[in-house]
Image (tube, rainbow, N blue to C red):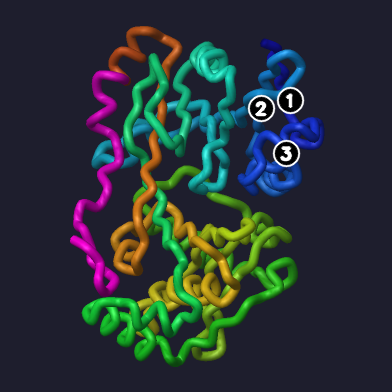
Amino acid sequence: MKLIIQRHAENLPAEWDTLTDGDPYMRRNFLSFIERTEMDYQPAYYLFYDADILDSCFVAFCNRKFDIAMFTKITFFRKVTLIYLPMSVTRPGIVLGKLRREVLETIKKIKGYKLVLNMEDEDAPGFATGLTCPKCILDVRWKTYKEYASSLRSDYRNRLKKVFSRSKGLRIRPIDNGKEFDDALYRMYLNVLDHSKTKIETLSREYFKGPFFKILVAEAEGQAVGFVQLLENGKELIFEFVGLDYRFNSEYQVYQRLLNEIIKYGIENHFERIDFGQTADEIKLKLGCRYEYLYAWLHHSDKIVNFFCKKFAHKIVYRPVEANYRVFKREKK
């Protein structure tokens, strides 16, 4: 095995994109974009070669004040090396191949706390493992938004009618985010961040102006009152971030309307699935989403500290919504 560590995405080989194919956030051009827009972001790119073939890789960066117990009522801030992508997205920042064991041993040797986020399994010997926020996925099987609305059971269909009745004064339009994403919209993102129970990082205004995204803005009374940021990934539509002016949210049902606009956009543009992200689970499950469970792997280089990490990990894991919502007609219990 050969290990190479790079500090800038522009120095990554073309093989990196081949290995990470299917994950838009792990592409070299996107990683370079993050480096340019997030000034405090100083990543390390680990490349693992097997007989001169790139087999595995991961992105790591240091968060000097990370709340390891963010899913509980307590706070436990520590300096943590995150193997993760710095946008709170549902993708992992790691690709594991035949050299899986060697990669995990390399992570273990990094000093202090290390946290690998958004993994699809718990297979990480020596790590404390447990559930993190699952992603909410809507499988698109309708040809029109009207067909989606008609497929809902009566309670959910009535709730949807109320949302559109309350939000009929909204105007929804796409913007040229490179030119139109201004300070007012950015403050709406910060508003939502301030209301969030789980905060990992705060993205810059420049991130939202990136060319990768589509932004839909809701306007009322002659001004913007909310927005959603989307990323198109082949047949998948990814919901990234939302911004809200809470003075208007209750009156116009801005957030609920924007979530439905994402569904409408996904159906009309022939996407096969919509990734609604990892927060506000209950609202998204009531739209018809299903869970895809994700796991976190925690390790400390000190054996005693790592022992306690494994012993108490079950107390700090994420607790998914347990209710089984029957959103669609003819849906089995």
**Disc 3 target residue:** 17
Q: Is residue 316 left or right of residue 199?
A: left
Lower position in the chain sequence, tag 3 or tag 1: 1
The magenta stretch is 310-333
Name which residue type carries label 1. Gln
Q: How many marks?
A: 3
Q: Secondary structure at mark 2?
A: strand
Instruction: Please tell me whether residue 286 is drawn above or below residue 309 in the rendered image.
Output: below
For the residue carrying disc 2, how many other residues have a C-alpha within 10 Å: few (<14), some (14-19), or many (20+)? some
Question: Cα distance, mark 3 to mark 1?
Answer: 15 Å
Q: What x and y, as percent, mark residue 237? A: 56, 61
Q: What x and y, as percent, mark residue 119? A: 45, 35
**Disc 1 target residue:** 6
The label number, if any, that marks residue 44 in the structure image: 2
Lower position in the chain sequence, tag 2 or tag 1: 1
Tell me if I can see residue 111 in this picture: no
Question: Cα distance, mark 2 to mark 1?
Answer: 6 Å
Instruction: Please tell me whether residue 139 is drawn above or below residue 59 in the rendered image.
Output: below
Q: What x and y, as percent, mark residue 173? A: 60, 81
Q: Quadrant of the C terminus?
A: bottom left
Instruction: Please tell me whether residue 235 is drawn above or below residue 244 in the rendered image.
Output: above
Lower position in the chain sequence, tag 2 or tag 3: 3
* 332 within the magenta span: yes
Tell me if I can see residue 203 in this picture: yes
Instruction: Please tell me whether residue 178 is drawn above or below residue 96 in the rendered image.
Output: below
Q: Secondary structure at mark 1?
A: strand
Name which residue type carries label 2. Ala
Asked whether disc 2 touches disc 1, contact meaning CB atoms under 8 Å apart, the reply is: yes
Q: For the residues carrying marks 3 and 1, which lies nearer the camera in this image? A: 3
Q: For the residues carrying marks 2 and 3, which lies nearer the camera in this image? A: 3
Q: What x and y, as percent, mark residue 149? A: 37, 81
Name which residue type carries label 3. Asp
